[in-house]
Amino acid sequence: MRKKIMLLGSGELGKEFVISAQRLGQYIIAVDSYPNAPAMQVAHEFEVINMLDADALQEIVSKHGPDIIVPEIEAIRTDKLVDFEQQGVQVVPSARAVNFTMNRKAIRDLAAKDVGVKTAGYRYATTLEELKSAVKEIGLPCVIKPLMSSSGKGQSVVRSEADTTKAWEDAIGKSRGDLKEVIIEEFIPFDSEITLLTVTQKNGPTLFCPPIGHRQERGDYMESWQPAKVTPGQFSQACEMAAEVTAALGGAGLWGVEFFLKGEDVYFSELSPRPHDTGMVTLAGTQTYNEFELHLRAVLGLTIPGIELLRPGASAVILASSEDENHPKFKGMEVAASCKNTDIRIFGKPNTRKYRRMGVVVAWGKPETSIDEIRKKALDTASYIQVK
C-alpha cells in the first residue's frame, strides 16, 4: 500500500510526518516557499513554489500526480484543494476542513453558530475604524488576531484603547496569505489552556489523546507537557466539543483542538487540521503513537486500536536570538546530551530570525514523576543549547 503523498508546507512538523511516512514505506514530495526546508531534507522529492499561486499548485500536482495531499501550513490557495479533491485526490483531512480551519472566521462561526460549542465573544474587522468599534463592543481587555496566521504570530492582548492601532498593524503585518481581516475576542481570564489531539478515522471511532498543557510567549508555544491537569468533567466537555466540531468538518486525520479552562468551564479556542506544535511532547514517548504516526495512520486508513498514556513528558523549544544568520550552528549540545531521560531534535532550518523555533528538547519520567520536575528538566536541557 505505497501512496504518493504531497506535503504542502515543509517545516518541523512536516519533517516528523515525513519520517513517520518513510517508516511505513510511503513516497513523499515536500513543498514549500523556500529551498532546503526541514521536511525537504528527508523527502524523496521537493518543489519550491508560492503555494498561494493556484497555477503553480496545479502545475506540481499535474507533474507528480499525488494520491494524497497533506497541508501543513495556512498560506495555501485552499480553493484549489477542492478542485483536486473533485479530481479524485485525497485531501487531508478533507478540502472542506482545510478551507474552514485555515481561516479563524470560518472555523469560529462554524463552532459557535453551527455546532453551538462554548467560545469567547468575538467580532471581526477589516479596517482600523471597525476594529476600534469592535473593541468597544467586546470590552477591554480583549485579544486581537489575524484571521490567518500560525503559531500565534500577530496576536496581541489589548488593555487600553491606545493599544488598538499597534495591535491592528501587528495583526495585519503578520497575517499569512492575502487575507487582511482580524478577529477581536473577549479576554477569558483562564486558569489554564490545553491542546486535545483528536483523531478522526475512516473506519473507526474518534479517539482522543491525553490532554496537553502548554505555555506561550509572544503568542507562540514555548513548552508543553502531557498529561495536563484536568478534571474528569473538563476532559469530558473538551472531548465532546472536539468530536462535534471535527465531525462537522469531516475527513480523517489528526486535529489539534485548543481549549481554555476556567473553573469547570471549557471554552473552544482554535483548531488545526494537522499535528500541533504543542504535540511535539509526544516525541518523548508519552503515548502509544506520537502525533505524527497517528496522523499518518488515519490518513492511510490504518486502524488505530487505541491511544494510551505510557509515561509523563514535556517539551521545551530552542530559539534563535539573532536575525538572518545562515547555516546556524548549535553550541552546548555536549552538555545537553548528558542530561538523562531527554532527547534533542534540531529541525534543520537553513537560517534564523529572532525567536525562530530552531529545535526542541523532550524529556520524560516514570509514571510517579511529577510533571513540574519533568518540565524543569526539559527547560534546563534546552537552556544549554545556543544557536550561533
Image (cartoon, grey):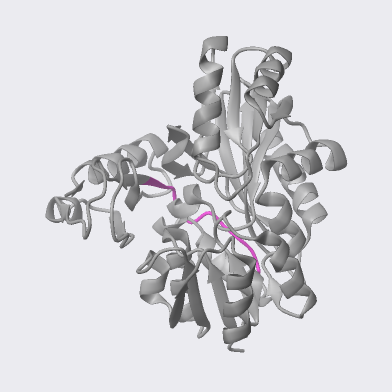
Residue 339 colored magenta? no
Q: Position of residue 134 (x, y in %)?
A: 71, 20
> To which quarter of the image does residue 130 belong?
top right
Q: Determine if residue 288 is in view.
A: no
The relative height of residue 139 versus residue 250 in the rendered view (above or below) is above
Residue 24 higher or lower than 157, as above or below: below
309 in magenta: yes
| 141 over 229 or under it: above or below | above
Nearest the camera: 361 or 161? 161
Q: Which residues are magenta?
A: 305-315
Residue at left 59%, top 27%?
A: 144
Q: Is residue 304 left or right of residue 149?
A: right
In the figure, 20 relative to 98: above or below? below
User: In front here: 42 or 289?
Assistant: 42
Query: Could you tell me how many numbered marks the image carries?
Result: 0
Q: Nearer the viewer, residue 64 or 172?
A: 172
Residue 332's spot in the image, x, y percent? 14, 50
For image coordinates 80% across by 75% down, the residue present is 86
Q: Position of residue 96 (x, y in %)?
A: 77, 59
- Identity of the residue furthest to the right in this view: 114
Which residue occupies 64% across, 56% down? 273
Quarter of the figure with residue 236: top right
- Relative placement, left or right, of 361 versus 93 is left
Where is the N terminus found, in terms of image quarters? bottom right
The residue at the far bottom in this view is 1
Dominant secondary structure of the magenta stretch?
loop
Report whether 252 appears left or right of 275: right
- The answer to whether any part of residue 298 appears in the image is yes
**Which residue shows up at 65% across the image and 36% down it?**
181
From the viewer's side, name the closer residue of 86 and 335: 86
Coordinates of residue 77 in the picture (x, y in percent): 64, 60
